[in-house]
Image: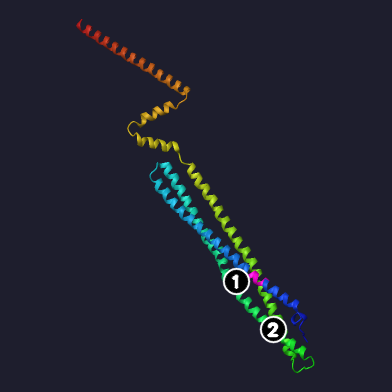
Amino acid sequence: MCRPGPGWGPGGDAGVASRDAQTRQLQDAVTNVEKHFGELCQIFAAYVRKTARLRDKADLLVNEINVYASTETPHLKQGLKNFADEFAKLQDYRQAEVERLEAKVVEPLKAYGTIVKMKRDDLKATLTARNREAKQLTQLERTRQRNPSDRHVIAETELQRATMDATRTTRHLEETIDNFEKQKIKDIKTIFSEFITIEMLFHGKALEVYTAAYQNIQKIDEEEDLEVFRHSLYPQDYSSRLDIVRANSKSPLQRSLSAKCVSGTGQVLTCRLRKDHQTEDDDEEDEDLDVTEEEN
């Protein structure tokens, strides 16, 4: 037959102290989770809101780049529009990041408010039951000590039942808090792993998009756009001005070769003029001879 241990009797001060220490530890564990999970939830929620605001500002930037690009020269216009398209794509990834963080990080932390409340209520109910059963066991033990020979006053079955109930309640309390601690550790690992995975996915995609955006900017042809601008600024004499600019941009060797070419061309033209003039004189002499022969 089961008998209560010394910790459950009036002289069991060590057992009572041990149970009180255990109770305080369990309550502190729940309070600690309630406090720090609440702080983590608030900070992560603020982090998500900041990310969402950054997405909104980026959307405004995309719109402004597109508006500005429509006023520019062809290559600059195309480069800016391609950049804006890539940057807009990045904001789609950022939107997915916001939604995932909300679902995988903030919501599970927020749910711990309800979990902690339930565990606190469960702990309170368990502690109440344990205290009630401990009092009942103590009362029965006192009665037994006052009447050690009166087997009719103390029902052995009641004493046994009280002892078993107290033991069962204590075990239930220990299992409850043990499960709570186990679930807390598991959830912490899951939440932070999700956070890291979401951030890694976003930044991996961001690196791809930023690379493409950088390449689009580098492809802008500065010289072509500069010529288009000059043509719009000087539409009439643009060709002559461009020739002067190009001539001035040549090296000394190129200018020397150009000068020789011009000089040679001038000599050829002079020879041609002289030859044409001599031909005209010969034709005139032939005409004079024809006239003289007729007169004779």
Residue that protrudes farthest toward the bottom in the picture: 152
Q: Secondary structure at mark 2?
A: helix
- Tell which of 63 and 296 is nearer to you: 63
Measured as percent of width and height from the top left, residue 86 is found at: 48, 50
- Tell which of 277 and 292 is nearer to you: 277
Q: Is residue 155 left or right of residue 120?
A: right
Mark 2 crowd level (few <14, some 14–19, many ≥20, 10 Å Cα)? some
Q: Secondary structure at mark 1?
A: helix
- Residue 29 within the segment the image draws in magenta: yes
Q: Quadrant of the N terminus?
A: bottom right
Does the rendering let one see residue 178? no
**On screen, residue 117 above or below 274:** below
Kindly report the secondary structure that dominates the magenta region of the rendered protein: helix
Does the rendering let one see residue 139? yes
Measured as percent of width and height from the top left, residue 256 is found at: 45, 20
Measured as percent of width and height from the top left, residue 275 is found at: 34, 14
**Residue 135: mark:** 2
Looking at numbered disc 2 in the image, what kind of residue is underneath it? Lys
- Quarter of the image holding residue 43? bottom right
**Residue 281: mark:** none
The alpha-carbon separation of the residues under discs 1 and 2 comes to: 28 Å
Looking at numbered disc 1 in the image, what kind of residue is underneath it? Val
**On screen, residue 258 above or below 57:** above
**Residue 116: mark:** 1
Measured as percent of width and height from the top left, residue 197 is found at: 59, 58
**Residue at 57% from the left image edge and 69% from the top image edge:** 113
Magenta stretch, residue numbers:
25-30
**On screen, residue 155 above or below 60:** below
Mark 1 crowd level (few <14, some 14–19, many ≥20, 10 Å Cα)? some
